[in-house]
């Protein structure tokens, strides 16, 4: 089975009548994703790509048994949307929205954890479980079904790694982009724990990046894992003092560097590679 997005998922799209959400909903449906309805306040009664639209999340939960949501709303409304999803009892919430204020992200994460829900994001491309579908933005053509779990802080690098694995006939169980902001709902270590417990996943790829301490903290989980882990940390050639694309890519003194992350993961037992091109050979060797 896959992790987080499974055969039991029944998802809604919050903000489904927006321009981006309409397009992404169509692409999610085209790859068979388990999307059952949409929600936009004031648009109840409309239909988007054949899906019914409701004014509030609770209506969609009651009528269609929804248990997950993918949220496409402006940053200013992201916290309210996430809280509505959590309070309606949804167990998986994928918050795509960018530029969510840090305090709002903290509040959304704490509300989700208090209610036992899993929050992925904000600023995430979502997740993909080949054979089941996707919740988010990931380009379907690069993925294939198989035994490798991928967890990434970068959306585009997750796509690149998945594409390289697919070309090498190494399919994926689930691919998750946790988001590039300083505060995210689901952290790297929690995803690794889920992959360790997943019967379909035989090996895991970590795609990290400079800044923050996600990788250093996740090293403790790697040390306890029985499954092989291959890790790549992006940003080795990033010039000091330069502002990078992700809000979470902040180095504080000697913490958060590529070297400190690679050292922590390597000491924990991961095979750390220095470029995406080295991931496939390292993974193939680990699976022999």
Image: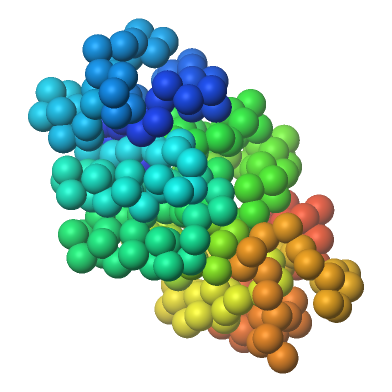
Q: Quadrant of residue 271?
A: bottom right
Quadrant hosting residue 249: bottom right
| Quadrant containing the C terminus in the rendered view | bottom right
- Where residue 148 appears, as percent x and y from the top left, is 54, 49
In front: 160, or 164? 160
In the image, taking residue 185 as reference, residue 278 lies left or right, namely: right
Placement of the N terminus among the 4 image quadrants = top left
* Total labels drawn: 0
Name which residue lies at 26% across and 62% down: 111
Residue under the point 15% across and 28% down: 59
* Residue 87 appears anywhere in the view: yes
Q: Nearer the viewer, residue 89 or 267?
A: 89
Q: How is the image coloured?
A: rainbow
**Left or right: 203 in relation to 168:** left
Q: Say above or below: 27 vs 225.
A: above
Q: Tell whether 133 sits left or right of 89.
A: right
Q: Is residue 129 visible?
A: no
Residue lying at 69% horizontally and 38% vertically, measured from the top left = 163
**Picture layout, residue 195 above or below residue 133:** below
Task: Tell me residue 198's x, y (percent).
Answer: 36, 54
> Could you say which is closer to the camera, residue 22 or residue 99?
99
Residue 176, given in percent of the width and then of the height, sits at 50, 49
Q: Image height check: is 60 above or below 249? A: above
Residue 265 lies, in percent from the top left, at 61, 78
Residue depicted at 56% across the width and 53% down the height: 99
Q: Nearer the viewer, residue 61 or 269?
A: 61
Identity of the residue furthest to the bottom in this view:
253
């Amino acid at each position: 089975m896959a992790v987080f997005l499974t055969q039991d998922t029944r998802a809604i799209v919050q903000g489904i009548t927006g321009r981006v959400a309409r397009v992404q909903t169509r692409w999610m449906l085209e790859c068979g994703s388990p999307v059952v309805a949409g929600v936009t306040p004031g648009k109840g009664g409309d239909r988007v790509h054949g899906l019914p639209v409701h004014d509030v999340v609770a209506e969609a939960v009651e009528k269609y048994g929804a248990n997950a949501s993918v949220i496409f709303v402006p940053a200013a409304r992201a916290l309210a949307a996430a809280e509505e999803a959590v309070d309606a009892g949804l167990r998986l919430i994928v918050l795509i929205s960018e530029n969510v204020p840090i305090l709002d992200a903290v509040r959304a994460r704490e509300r989700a954890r208090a209610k036992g829900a899993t929050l992925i994001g904000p600023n995430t491309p979502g997740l993909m479980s080949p054979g089941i579908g996707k919740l988010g933005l990931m380009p379907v053509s690069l993925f294939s079904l198989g035994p490798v779990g991928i967890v990434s802080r970068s959306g585009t690098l997750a796509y690149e790694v998945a594409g390289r694995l697919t070309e090498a006939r190494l399919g994926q169980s689930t691919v998750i982009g946790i988001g590039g902001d300083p505060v995210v709902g689901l952290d790297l270590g929690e995803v690794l724990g889920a992959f360790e417990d997943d019967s379909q996943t035989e090996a895991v790829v970590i795609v990290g990046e400079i800044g923050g301490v996600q990788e250093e903290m996740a090293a403790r989980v790697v040390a306890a894992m029985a499954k092989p882990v291959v890790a790549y940390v992006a940003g080795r050639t990033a010039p000091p003092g330069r502002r990078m694309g992700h809000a979470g890519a902040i180095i504080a003194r000697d913490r958060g560097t590529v070297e400190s992350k690679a050292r922590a993961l390597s000491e924990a037992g991961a095979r750390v590679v220095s470029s995406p091109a080295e991931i496939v050979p390292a993974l193939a060797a680990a699976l022999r």
